[in-house]
Image (cartoon, rainbow, N blue to C red):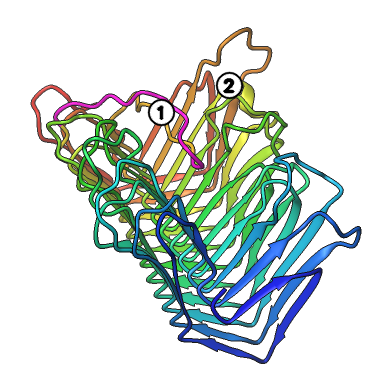
Amino acid sequence: GSAVTFHGNKLSFIDSVIEGNLGLSGPKSDAAGGAVLFVVGRDSKDPHSAIFLNCTISTNTVSALYAVSNVAGGAIAFISGPSPNILDENKNVSIVFKDCLITNNSVHMNSDPDPHSSLLLGGAISVSLDDFTVRMVVMHCHFAGNRIWSTNEVAIAAGGAIYFTSRSVNSRFAVVDTVFSNNSASAGKALFSISQAGLCFGGAISIESTAFVNITASNFTSNRCLGGEMGVSGARSHGGALSIVYPTRTSVFGNRILISQTKFLHNSVLHRAFASYGRSVATGGAVHIDLDIGRQIESLSVRDCEFAHNHVSSESSGAGGALFIQGVKSSFSKPISITHNMFADNYVASSLKTAEIESQPLQGVAIARSLVCPTSAGALYIEISEPKGNVTRATEFIMRRSKFTQNEVTGPQASGAAVCIVGLPNATIWDSEWKGNELRCTQPGDGS
């Protein structure tokens, strides 16, 4: 933290301006917190807490001038102090941002090519507290123009405004009445020699956690996720506004995911991978949810939301112009519920030639699997696959009172102008409307 580094229990910023601070990394070192760094240690029996109330947090940057492992938190970063990598459910951390204006902060890498993977996390805020139970609330805030970017190679970029990770099932992440506009995450140009290359998650928010996620009464507008150009495993972009991934390194059950009363407008996933490599994917123009690791969650519900003018544009495979959900049949203890939502003028456009992606865990951020339908679902894509071993529960899908208007898919092997549902034995759709959706197949005989 170039302005404040805090090793303690309780930190409060009230009616403060945090502006124009810069943190630079040294050779081969991590960098975190362009303005504020909160180091959470284990040596105190008291809970840790941080509150930012009515603050202006602007134009702060953390930058790496050399190839490093992690660069996190353009303005503010929360990290664990030196300790064993053991989850302690009884160690609690509370983080609150309320009535704050958080703008034009950035995480930046400008380094020579390096054969090692790097992580760029949280253009404005990064919370990397795997070993703690974290309860984070963002309320009545505005995040605008925050970004992750690179002038050279970088492997993984996650969370243009916020990155959050905690492997405790008791953790909570809530966003209430908050605006995210024009935030972006870009993975730059990936090295062909790096298998974990050109990966991007969450133009505004990237969540890698089994926490209870609650996004309500908020607005996500014109956020963007941009994958790299090439790589042995291909560049991949997920979630123009929001990406939620259950991490592969945890074995606990998951929790609830609730997205309600929220608008997703003009968000995008852009994909620059060369189609000839055929090992790349772009998903979730607005929202990407990947639970494809066999974890059980209590419920997944999207209700009373508006998805309009979101899109996925890819030189390889793409799916879910607005909303993308992927999981396995044993992941859900209750039906997936999509209720009273409007999907209008979302689209997927692809120049796909071939598409196949191998599933593999990466350092820090998990990856979506291969797509059964590689160019599909202008609005909503849901794919539930067969897990390994015996299945005792069949996942169900319920949609109620939703409208799909003028959504579109353009590309080879195209399917599902509005919706594509794969692998679900039971799907029930009630009282919904489908008007003016359009499928444009660019290869004869491939459309469905």
Q: Are marks 2 and 1 in contact (CB under 8 Å)?
A: no
Please state the horizontal and vertical placement of residue 124, each as a whole percent of the image: 50, 70
Q: Quadrant of residue 188?
A: bottom left
Please state the horizontal and vertical placement of residue 443, each as a whole percent of the image: 9, 29
Magenta stretch, main secondary structure class: loop
Could you tell me the amino acid type at mark 1?
Arg
What residue is shown with label 2? Answer: 329
Q: Nearer the viewer, residue 180 or 123?
A: 123
Instruction: Please provide the residue range marked out in magenta.
Output: 353-365
Residue 369 is tagged as 1
Residue 400 at least partly seen: yes
Question: What residue is rendered at 41% in x and 78% in y?
Answer: 104
Q: Nearer the viewer, mark 2 or mark 1?
A: 1
- Mark 1, secondary structure of its residue: loop
Please state the horizontal and vertical placement of residue 389, each as a whole percent of the image: 60, 8
75 left or right, relative to 360: right
136 left or right, relative to 195: right
Q: Residue furthest front?
A: 27
Question: What residue is rendered at 60% in x and 32% in y?
Answer: 249
For the C terminus, the quadrant is: top left
170 left or right, relative to 186: right
Q: Is residue 90 magenta?
A: no
Q: Nearer the viewer, residue 249 or 175?
A: 249
**Other-residue count near label 2 (Cα within 10 Å), few / some / many at <14 / 14–19 / ≥20:** many
Q: Residue furthest top?
A: 390
- Mark 2, secondary structure of its residue: helix
Could you tell me the amino acid type at mark 2?
Lys
Q: How many marks?
A: 2
